[in-house]
Amino acid sequence: MSTSPEEITVYEEVRARPEFAELRRRFRSFVFPVTVAFLVWYLLYVVLSGWARGFMGQQVVGSINVALIFGLLQFVSTFGLAYWYARYAGSKLDPLAERLREEAGR
């Protein structure tokens, strides 16, 4: 970080603003819990596939078993989370980031 006022970069100026701290707080309050939840969901699938073969191999309809349904739900949840994040960012993060960008545009 720079020490004299004439050496302060735009990033350092923006980073010192309370709005930037709020932006980081909003981002982290969404991303960290959702990441943990998704990793738990993914690891549940892996663990069940390795240690609960009887359960995962149960036929649900025809030749479709529980493992196949869980595997497909991994894709569905991935796209669902991407959509959820895009909506969250569009409503909570982007307006604040745009305001910071405009104010920093000397």
Image: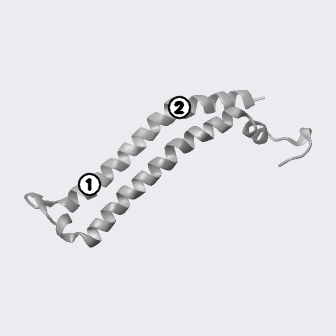
At x 75%, y 41%, the residue is: 11
The foreground one among 32 and 79 is: 32
Please, which residue is most extreme toward the left here?
62
Left or right, residue 106 beside residue 66: right
In this rendering, is residue 47 above or below 79? below
In front: mark 1 or mark 2?
2
Whether pointer 1 and pointer 2 mark residues with C-beta atoms closer than 8 Å, the reply is no
Left or right, residue 52 beside residue 43: left
Q: Quadrant of residue 42?
A: bottom left
**Residue under label 1:** 72
The foreground one among 48 and 106 is: 48
Left or right, residue 37 beside residue 5: left
**Residue under label 2:** 92
Classify the position of the C terminus by image quarter: top right
Badge 2 amino acid: Lys
Q: Quadrant of residue 41?
A: bottom left
In this rendering, is residue 74 above or below 25? below
Mark 1: which secondary structure?
A: helix
In this rendering, is residue 72 above or below 27? below
At x 21%, y 55%, the residue is: 69
Task: State the separation of the CA atoms marked 1 and 2.
Answer: 30 Å
